[in-house]
Structure formats: structure tokens, C-alpha cells
Image (spheres, helix red, strand yellow):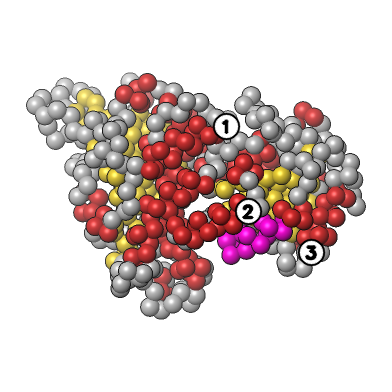
Amino acid sequence: MARPVQRPRSGTIPSMEVATNAIRDSATFIVFGASGDLAKKKTFPALFALYRKDYLPRDVHIVGYARTKMNTEDYHRRISSYIKRDNDPNFDTKLEEFKNLSFVYSESFCRLNAHLVEIEKSYRTSNRIFYLALPPSVFIPVAKHAREECYSRGVNRIIVEKPFGKDLQSCRELLNELKKYWKEEETYRIDHYLGKEMVKNLLVLRFANITMGAGWDKNSISNVQITFKEPFGTEGRGGYFDEFGIIRDVLQNHMLQVLSILTMERPVSFSPEDIRDEKVKVLRAIPPVERKDTLLGQYVAADDKPGYLDDDTVPKDSVCPTFAATVLWIHNPRWEGVPFIMKAGKALNQAKVEVRIQFKDVTQGIFAEISRNELVVRIQPQEAVYLKLNTKSPGYAFRAIPTEMDLTYNRRFTEATIPEAYEVLILDALRGDQSNFVRDDELDVAWKIFTPILHWIDGKEGEKPKPEPYPYGSRGPATLDAFVESYGYKRTEEAYNWPTTNLSNL
């Protein structure tokens, strides 16, 4: 067994806000499902990124646990296959070090524990993080065996990936079973959107700027749209997607997390429980989504691109929605009457995730029919915040035109590197910071909001609704614009082009 690689202490977790229960000196990451796509594409690249930046503890090992038989060479090839090479002259050295810290096992849990003990025999403390990069069907048996056979005397934490159930009942069953083996404070339910830079930035934008807080309520805001667009379809993975659908895949978790941060009241502090308390409070004020507030779609073939039903893994009579727009209402003094429109879909015209807050019309009189103000937070790609407002057009004419105050990150922060969401969240798990992980009661109330509409779509309350077809590469169903506008959204009447500055005219 290889001896642990000694690394300088200067590389321990670098933060002024490190939790008191942070793992600093030593840790072993056990990645269950090491042969799967999630581990290969997200978990291992994130661990390597943290390693090369010296954000992992000084003594660290990564142990991949997989049912698929692999030798060490195959395993190392697999864990590095999605690691992006850059121009750092130390890249190859760091990658080789990372591989030397990484082992693969496919034996019993008891034998796995023996290997872990051997790896950790030079550690001062045996701290273990168990990462379940697995389908939910095996969460409980793996969590059970990890707790009963691989629990160490140091700090133990378990990271669980979504989906956390398929509806309220299955979620509660999963939560109750997991709690038999792991305490809530040891459990980290990961939703990677909570690690995205602009989602984390919502807290700063809202609570560190008095100008934002002044108009952040029903008196100033007409409507809010949270949009998730993917330009590709299921691409041969439709069989898996068909079991869940777009609402379970995106709305009930990622988009609802964004909404809760966007709408919650100011927390007492930035401690994990204070933040999550406020998220739960606002989610409890949201009634279940109604059918009349829902638009469903399914993409069809267009321009040589296959339709959803053309995927050989999808049942030919499937009415699973690949697009959904739903409207949520928050019944509290701040947000009563403001529609929150969530839109998500596959095979659309672009890749984009954004929050668009549209303010109400100005008082009529001296100005009429001018564009509404909008605050847009672009989560991806090209992170940005911009405020759309009206200004006088340059020249002799007295005319208001729309323009924007633009904070696009790659232009403003030219030297900054934005970490991947999984890097942020794994580091948070090391720190013992659960702020950006989903608490059990938060998960419960999230399923309450969506379970009735999901049961309708699943056919548990009669005939399944038939989604509206939309062409691959379009903006979505043909009725989408009318649907959104029925909740008060107003488009700019005139064509809007971002103004540019011609320096030769100055």
C-alpha cells in the first residue's frame, strides 16, 4: 500500500469563514459509483481541481468503489478522461500526484474498510467523506453498509446526489430510511445549482445592496421568470429521462432552489441553519402548482434533428414532457400576487439559464408605452447581471430608449476564474458548511409543491395530459408567448439592440 503523499500545510482549506467542524489535516474520499458518468464527468474533475489548488487536506486519498472490474491503469484513465488540460506547467505533475492518491476497489464493504484503515494508518485522524454518485435505487443499501462497516472514529459525512425520490411519498420513504443510518448533520444532499457562482451571488445582490432591497417586492415587481434552456435532446438517454421528465429533472430541484434564494427574507446570519430556515419559510408559503398554471411540451423532429419519440430508448407512445412552464405563487406579504414563471426544456434554440425580474410600468402621463425595467441575472453561460432601463436618446430629440447597465463577468473580472459548482460544494462539505445543501424539511416542502401536478402527468388521476409538440431548435411550444404574457409579462414593442459606443464620434 502506497504511503500518503505529504503536502504543505499552507494548502489547507483557505477561508476566513471555515466552519469549526472543518476537516483540515486528513480525509479519505470514497466515491461509490466510480465507474459511472457522474463520477467521471463531475466528481473526479472537481476533486482534481481542488487538489491542484491545494484546497484539499494535506493528507488525502480518493478511493473509487465500483462494481465494474477495473485495474489501476483503467481506473486512472477513466478518472482523468474529463479533466481539462490547461497551460499550467505543473499540470502533468499534479495529475500524476492525483492518480497516485487514487485507488479503485470492487470488493465487499468489510474488505473496503480494511483497505481504508491501511491507507489511513499514518493519519492523525481518520475522516471519511462518502460520495454516492449512484442512482437512487441503491442509495439506502450503500448508505447502510457504509455506516455499518466503514464508519470511522473521526468525522464522517455522506454526500447524496439527486433525485431524492419521485414524489412526496417516495421522498419521505427515502429520507426516513437514510436517517436510520446517518444523522442530518452528517448528510449533505447535493443540488449542484447551489454551487453556481451567480446563484450564490443572489444573496449578495439582495442583501448587500440597499437599492435592490427597496424595490424587491410586489409593489415594484410585475413578474419573475426563471428560465432553463438546453439546445440538445435526450441523445439516446431518453429511457432514463422518460422515467422522470423535465419537472423532476430541473424544476422541482434546481429552479426551485433559485426561487427560494430569490424570494426568502433576510437571514439573521450566514450560518447554514439561518439561511435554510428562511428558504423553508418561503417555500411553505407556496401552494401546489395547479394544472391551469402549467404548459407542457414535447419536442419533435426538425431540420434533420430527431424528435423525442425517435429516441430508440423512449416508448413510442410516451407523453413525457420535455418542456414545462409552470407558475408559482407565494402567499406572503412581500410577494402576494406576483407570478413566478418557471420555464425549462430540452432541444430548444439555445443554452441559457437566467432569472428575469420585470418591474411594473411607470406612472402614465409624461411617459407612455415605454419599456419596463428588467433586472436579469444570467446564471450560465457567460455569467452576468444587467439592469435594463430607459434613458434619453442622444441628440436633439427628447425620446426615451431602452438601454442597460451591464455587469458581464468575463469583461469586468478579466483575471478571475469561476470554479465549477461541484468544486464549490465538495469544498463546502469539507468545511462542514451545509448552507448550500438541501435540508430534509426543505426537500419535503419542495415535493409538496410539485407532487399533485406530477401525479396528473403520470396518469395517477386519470388520463395523462398530452404535451404540445414543438420543433427541435425552437423557443418551445407555439402557445408559450401567450402563456407568459397572460401572467403580465410585457415584451419590448420596438426592436431592441444593445447600444454601442462609436469612439470616433466623441
Amino acid type indicated by mark 3: Ser
Location of mark 2 (residue): 180
**Which mark sits nearer the N-terminus, 3 or 2?**
3
Nearer the camera: disc 3 or disc 2? 2
Closer mark to the observer between disc 2 and disc 1 = 2
Neighbours of disc 2 within 10 Å: few (<14), some (14-19), many (20+)? few
Is residue 384 shown above or below 32? above
Q: Main secondary structure of the magenta part?
A: helix
| Residue at (74, 55) in percent of width and height | 148
Q: Nearer the viewer, residue 214 or 405?
A: 214
Q: Position of residue 67 (x, y in %)?
A: 73, 67
Is label 3 in contact with label 2 (beta carbons under 8 Å)?
no
**Element type at mark 3:** loop
**Judging from the image, what secondary structure is the residue with disc 1 in?**
loop
Confirm whether residue 491 shows in the render. no
Which segment did they paint magenta?
135-146
Q: In front: 466, or 175?
A: 175
Residue 137 is situated, as x and y percent measured from the top left of the image, at 58, 65
Numbered circle sitting on residue 108: 3
